[in-house]
Amino acid sequence: MDSRQSFGKSLRLVRTAKGLTQEDFSTVSSRTYLSTLERGLKSPTLDKIEALCDTLDVHPLSLLVLTYLHTQKNKRLDSLLKKIEKEVKALQQ
């Protein structure tokens, strides 16, 4: 699964888990655009991810972590978060 498809799957998963419809995003996106994102046909900008996550009431990194968990089979959340923490700490020094 490529990153666009994985992002779309994650976006749909979070949206439905939160009990939201595509129409609930009308202040930040059209239903048509949201549908293209969920089908993996387009990639959003960082600004769009932030706006979508505001509506979803989740941190943008939560959505991105779900996305990368879908793209990397057999990857576990704890090992991915440890890798991210290690990389960020190394880059901050």
Image (tube, rainbow, N blue to C red):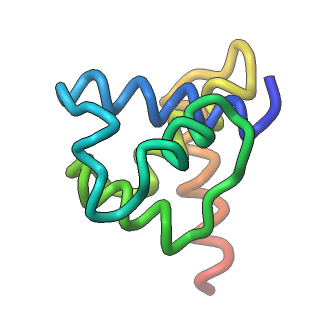
Q: 50 above or below 15?
A: below
Residue at left offset 71%, top offset 30%: 5
Vertical side of 87 occupied by 43: above or below: above
Seen as rendered, the residue at the extreme top is 74
Left or right: where does residue 81 sit relative to residue 23? right
Residue that sits furthest to the bottom in the current view: 93
Residue 71 point in image, percent of width and height: 73, 28
Q: Position of residue 42 (x, y in %)?
A: 71, 48
- Position of 90 with respect to 49 (left or right) is right
Q: Nearer the viewer, residue 5 or 22?
A: 22
Rendered view: 39 above or below 33: above
Lateral position of residue 91 relative to residue 9, left or right: right
Percent across and percent down for residue 69 are 61, 28
Residue found at x 54% / y 56%: 85
Q: Nearer the viewer, residue 87 or 17?
A: 17
Looking at the image, which residue is at 59% across and 83% down? Answer: 92
* Residue at 57 percent of width and 22 percent of height: 76
Residue 7, quarter of the rendered image: top right
Residue 53 appears in which quarter of the rendering? bottom left
Task: From the top left corner, tell me how far across and down residue 70 is, in percent.
Answer: 64, 24
Residue closest to the eye, 59 or 12? 12
